[in-house]
Image (cartoon, rainbow, N blue to C red):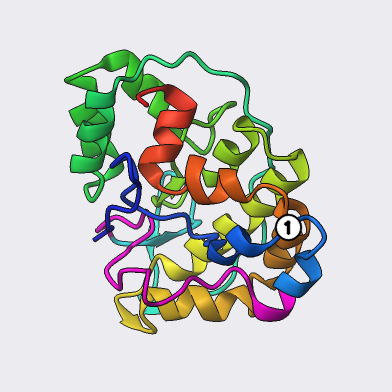
């Protein structure tokens, strides 16, 4: 499962964008970052059990809400052929408390419905802010996708914290692609190997767009929105 990464104990699932080397990249060095693949985290600092927001549930393909179809669990899965549109996040009420973040992290490995129910029992307003669906007009930090996955909206956090819209847009594509391809790693490649390979494979366009747009936002990527708990706290309160 996810490893605690934040000094504030808010981070459980680390951002799959993984700009570890952006801490060393200034605005004039994005091209050099591309050359060394700044998206690949240092294996020594990335827990092998880090599931980056993946929950223990069977993946399904886009077969419509009434007839989901179980997909292969061999990793990597096919790359997505389409992406939900990027939406710049609106400023949201922030009803969550620090205790709510603890509740969120304690239940993060469960299904979307179980996570939401646990939060609702503590703070219904916080649950309404945090848990949304792909079809909703506005996304919260945790999104249930149309194919049954649990998606952590890191890109929305980046934009809300002050990163350029182009950074959020590129990271949205990269995150959606990597989670879609690598959330099914029960056989074949492990999750970390899948993420690393697909940054230069099926998700290369998203990687290039993100590196080009987010080079000046290393503090936001590496600290403010570093983990899933940070994303929830930034978007819905609880710091």
> Viewer-proximal residue, 29 or 136?
29
Task: Point out residue 230 in the picture as x, y percentages from the top left corner.
Answer: 41, 39
Quadrant in which residue 21 is drawn: bottom right
Q: Which of 38 and 206 is in front in this view?
A: 38
The N terminus lies in which quarter of the figure? bottom left
Q: Is residue 107 left or right of residue 58?
A: left
Residue at the location (25% across, 41% down)? 105
Q: Is residue 77 visible?
A: no
Using a 10 Å C-alpha cutoff, classify the residue at mark 1 as few (fewer than 14 neighbours), some (14 to 19) or many (20 or more): some
User: Quarter holding the C terminus?
Assistant: top left
Place residue 203 in its image quadrant. Answer: bottom right
Residue 77 vertical position relative to residue 144 in the rendered view, above or below: below
Left or right: 187, with 163 as reference point: left
Part of the protein shown in magenta = 34-57
Q: Reply above or below: 61 against 200.
A: above
Q: Can residue 56 be found in the magenta stretch?
A: yes
Relative to 189, residue 7 above or below: above
Look at 31% across and 69% down and name the residue there.
47
In the shown orientation, is residue 79 left or right of residue 114? right
Residue sitting at 59 percent across and 26 percent down?
Answer: 137
Residue at the spot of label 1: 26
The image quadrant that residue 157 belongs to is top right
Helix, strand or loop status at disc 1 = loop
Residue 166, how many percent across, how many down? 77, 45
Q: Pinpoint residue 191: horizontal percent, then vertical percent.
A: 38, 74
Magenta span has 108? no
The structure residue drawn at horizontal position 48% and vertical position 13%, both measured from the top left corner, is: 93
């Amino acid at each position: 499962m996810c490893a605690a990464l934040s000094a504030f104990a808010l981070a459980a699932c680390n951002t799959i964008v993984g700009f570890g080397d952006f801490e060393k990249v200034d605005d004039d060095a994005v091209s050099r970052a591309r050359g060394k693949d700044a998206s690949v985290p240092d294996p020594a600092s990335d827990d092998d059990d880090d599931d980056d927001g993946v929950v223990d549930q069977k993946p399904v393909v886009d077969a419509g809400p009434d007839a989901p179809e179980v997909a292969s669990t061999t990793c990597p899965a096919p790359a997505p052929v389409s992406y939900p549109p990027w939406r710049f996040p609106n400023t949201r009420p922030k009803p969550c408390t620090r205790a709510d973040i603890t509740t969120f992290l304690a239940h993060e490995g469960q299904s979307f419905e179980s996570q939401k129910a646990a939060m609702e029992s503590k703070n219904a307003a916080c649950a309404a802010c945090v848990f949304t669906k792909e079809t909703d007009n506005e996304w919260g930090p945790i999104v249930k996708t149309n194919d049954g996955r649990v998606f952590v909206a890191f890109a929305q956090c980046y934009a809300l914290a002050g990163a350029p819209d182009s950074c959020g847009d590129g990271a949205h594509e990269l995150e959606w692609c990597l989670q879609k391809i690598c959330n099914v790693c029960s056989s074949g490649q492990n999750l970390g190997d899948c993420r690393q390979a697909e940054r230069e494979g099926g998700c290369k366009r998203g990687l290039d767009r993100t590196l080009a747009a987010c080079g000046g936002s290393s503090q936001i990527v590496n600290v403010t929105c570093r983990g899933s708990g940070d994303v929830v706290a930034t978007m819905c309160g609880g710091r």
